[in-house]
Image (spheres, grey):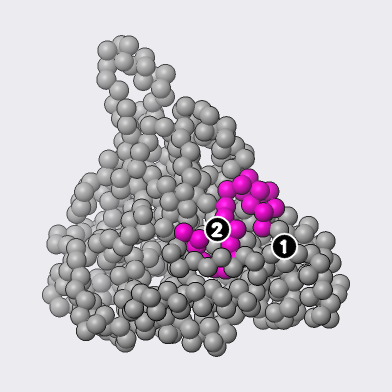
Amino acid sequence: MFHRMTSSVAALALMAGTAWAAPDAITLGMVLEPPNLDPTAGAAAATDEVVYANVFEGLTRFGSDGAILPALASSWDVEEDGKVYVFHLHPGVKFHDGADFTAEDVVFSLDRARAADSTNAQKVLFEGIESVEAVDPETVRVTLRAPDGNFPFKMAWGDAVMVDAASASDLATKPVGTGPFQFGNWVQGDRIVLNAFDGYWGEKPALKTATFRIISDPTAAFAAMMAGDVDAFPNYPAPETLAQLQADPRFKVLVGTTEGETILAMNNTQPPLDNAKVREAIAHAINREDIVQGAMFGYGTPIGSHFAPHHPDYVDETGKSAYDPEASKALLAEAGVSDLTLRLALPPPPYARRGGEIIAAELREVGIQTEITNMEWAQWLETVFKGGDFDLTVISHTEPMDIDIYARPDYYFHYAKPEFVALMDQLKATTDPAARSDLLKQAQDMIADDHVNAFLFQLAKTGVANAKIEGLWENAPTQANDLTKVHWID
């Protein structure tokens, strides 16, 4: 039976004397296909967009407002001034394959994530762990090397979800978690299907089936919404058509915030980008408003550092890299750089492809040529993110509060200035809120002053949904399409 009922069909049903029954299935559109379905072994946001809070759960989780909530841990005690965390687990939790979830699975999951051979993209979340001990089947004691008031936040990331040793090696294509939905099937290049898990330990979702359709082309995304082929597009890729959809009573448009700092990333070890004057010249050559209007049709907030404007510790650094082509030319002359050609790698999202073309044109105005390479997502991850083989690239970093990536020496834009590393080390050891706020502001100042990257805009969350759907996230405190509260209304 076709799982959606249009308003006209509903009207006919009422005229015939039958009540309208809310559907129990949903089809969502998404732009990027995940390279795999294991959130603990990759950096792709598209993976979490399918599995976070749906298939996999952690000890804690992000709420729709960014709050840190209990998940598999019903509560936790903080001991020794934040050096020890004792997590109390929900009883009776099972994995989708029927295996019991116990404290031993927490020990396995955290030890696996922090192991020397771990492929976890966020190993930094676990590096402060000294030991993990199963006190009893429902109690876990985590001892840290130093106090960390931010540890429950770290455990809420998709990279920190709990997995079972028996199924861990196959999670990329056969994900097995404890969440309200279990993996159904994956038709490569087309769709991923999740089904409600009858044995779920918590509140059962209203939906029985969720299908994620892969639709990368903005025109096709609009056509799919108009035709009813998808019920919602939580991260809608065609902002130029939002006004048309908003005017149509069949749909509602959801506009919120994300943690996505969109940047023109620069390879800081690649000459002449190892020269701060050249990086500053590039930053001054770019008109952020042109990018926001031309690539995002007005949806986006200009930023001058790697920090979300909605965060209380945000510092407006945009003045340090304001659009100034003449200053850009002067800086290039000071650096002794002329006839410069740089490689610009662009992943698939429309903000990158559209924004990249605008950036290339503006760099050309100050004498910098670019060689554009449009890459598929897997190619970008392998060549740019893992391999560091690039000069420039446009990407949105959607992880929450991730300014610490600038302290990682092996991170793809290769900054890791010793003074910045020291600042992050100090932040980790600091629990006083006022002192942490000051350190975060210093961090924003430093990367803005060094023009590590050209900071463009904070990605807005623009979603479209059937007007009868409730429960989708308006904001995106993490990269997720949490379906636990999604339901249809009459």
Quarter of the image that includes the N terminus = top left
SS under mark 2: strand
Q: Residue at x 54, y 73 (%)?
A: 444
Residue range (magenta): 288-310
Residue 371: quarter of image: bottom right
Q: Amino acid at mark 2?
A: Gln
Specify few, some or many for label 1: CA neighbours under 10 Å numbering under 14, 14-19, or 20 or more: some
Spot occupied by residue 68 in the image (x, y as percentages of width and height):
31, 62
- Residue in the picture at 48% in, 87% down: 422
Instruction: Report the residue marked by disc 1.
Output: 323
Looking at the picture, which amino acid does disc 1 mark?
Answer: Tyr
Total labels drawn? 2
Residue 300 located within the stretch drawn in magenta = yes
Q: Nearer the viewer, residue 320 or 232?
A: 320
Horizontally, residue 302 falls left or right of residue 254, namely: right
Q: What residue would you read off at disc 2? A: 458
